[in-house]
Amino acid sequence: MEDTPLAKVRSYVLRGGRLGPGQERALAELGPRFVLPFEPRPLQAQAVFGRSAPLVVEIGFGMGDATAAVAAAAPERDFIGIEVHEAGVGALLKRIGEQQLANLRLLRHDAVEVLGAMIAPDSLAAVHVWFPDPWPKKRHHKRRLIQPPFVALLASRLAPGGYLHCATDWAPYAQQMLEVLQAEPALANRSPGFAPRPAWRPLTKFENRGLLLGHGVWDLVFERRRASFGPGDEAPVVGREHEQAEADAVPGKGPEVVARDPAQ
Ligand SMILES: C[S@@+](CC[C@H](N)C(=O)[O-])C[C@H]1O[C@@H](n2cnc3c(N)ncnc32)[C@H](O)[C@@H]1O
């Protein structure tokens, strides 16, 4: 696998498509408060949320169903969802309004640029990258997000002990993720190989589509090492609260989750 320099190739193609009336209304009414502008300087999370709390970034939230569920389940944490697709931003804003989610803000911008410019080093409790576009054709592999330069950037933004959680339903990409994450010296795998599917991770829209197609699902959870990390050092516990339920899952296999038929 060749390394592609950061910001040379986009990991997405902007889709057109009309906004639903609810999405349009949410963008107009809630956008000014909940969508942060892209700025080439570090975000002041404390000022944005009006408090100091562990900060979690989700990259490519799609329509945001899982994002809203996770933010609602963890009111003690603050979340920033990054997505380029306007309809997705509108859909998640609608949920923010319906569920009164005060701990979630959105950015409609390329996550590679946001992480580089707006997120300070050592500042995040967690990064979620759930079902990034798999770009299955070989000539498109360079568009995949999970590649060494971006993973190094993500690792540098995590606080020591913070975690990077990736998931995919595309077997070759799962293998690439494992190789790339294992090769990043700042990260340590929390599991031997693929991780059990954390029970707290909601079924995402894209995951559900993959399950209906008979795909497997692979989770990977890696932790930012402390600078002095070495034999006998214990990893700190930032962001491990949700792990209790992981023991129920089957390591390295697809999740015990049944796809929902969208027609029902
Ligand atoms: C395959 S979809 C998965 C969406 C959602 N996570 C899910 O599981 O349903 C990947 C999403 O990532 C977004 N995306 C891809 N590259 C991105 C980037 N560099 N910055 C922000 N969003 C990105 C795409 O627009 C798309 O909505």
Image (tube, rainbow, N blue to C red):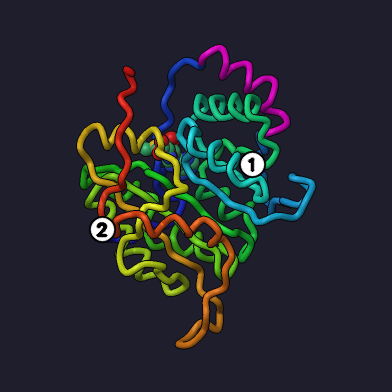
In the image, the segment drawn in magenta is: 20-34
* Kind of residue at badge 2: Gln
* Kind of residue at badge 1: Phe
- Around disc 1, counting alpha carbons within 10 Å, would you say few (fewer than 14), some (14 to 19), or many (20 or more)? some
Q: How many marks?
A: 2
Asked if residue 157 shows in the view, the reply is no
Which residue is pictured at 63% across the width and 53% down the height? 55
What whole-number distance in Å separates the C-alpha atoms at marks 2 and 1? 33 Å
Label 2 SS: helix
Label 1 SS: loop
Which residue is pictured at 64% across the width and 61% down the height? 123
The mark found on residue 248 in the picture is none
Q: Is residue 3 above or below residue 73?
A: below
74 vs 129, left or right, is right
Question: Which residue sits furthest top?
Answer: 21
User: Residue 202, position in %: x, y?
Assistant: 44, 41
